Image: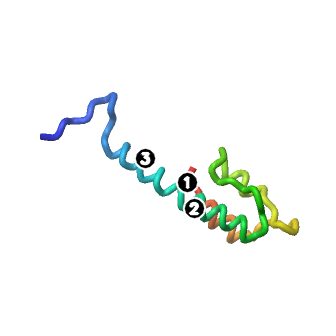
Amino acid sequence: MVKAPTPERGPPSLCRERKVLIVERRPARSIASGAAVSQGISGYEAATPRPRERWDMLHTGDGRLLPDHLKAQVRRELIV
């Protein structure tokens, strides 16, 4: 027999969704860090607070702005 969720516990689907998002967060951070390294950027950590805002402010290793398509790809990957 399955117990009905209580208001304190909430629906079980929310817990599962959160777990899935946490698991998916790791590959997204790896993609963002890899994209930074490919552009000559060192020291970018996707695990820091507000990684999307930090990503938008980055420049390549030679001082150019990041390409728009790369910014868009990483913004889509970062689930934060």
Q: Residues within 10 Å of mark 1 (few under 14, many from 20)?
A: some
Q: Quadrant of residue 37?
A: bottom right
Residue 59, above or below 13: below
Residue 62, above or below 5: below
Residue lying furthest left: 1
- Marks 1 and 3, how far apart at CA: 11 Å
Relative to 78, 10 lies left or right: left
Q: Quadrant of residue 27?
A: bottom right
C-beta proximity under 8 Å, tags 2 and 1 = yes
- Marks 2 and 1, how far apart at CA: 6 Å
Q: Return the disc, 3 or 2, that comes first in the chain's sequence.
A: 3
Total numbered labels placed on residues in the image:
3
Q: Position of residue 13 (x, y in %)?
A: 33, 46
- Marks 3 and 2, how far apart at CA: 16 Å
* Callout 3 amino acid: Arg
In the rendered image, which quarter contains the N terminus?
top left
* Callout 1 amino acid: Ile
Which residue corresponds to the image point at 83% horizontal and 66% vertical from the top-left?
Answer: 61
Q: Return the disc, 1 or 3, that comes first in the chain's sequence.
A: 3
Per the image, the residue denoted by label 1 is 79
Q: Position of residue 56 (x, y in %)?
A: 74, 57
Per the image, the residue denoted by label 2 is 77
Per the image, the residue denoted by label 3 is 18
Q: Residues within 10 Å of mark 3 (few under 14, many from 20)?
A: few
* Callout 2 amino acid: Glu
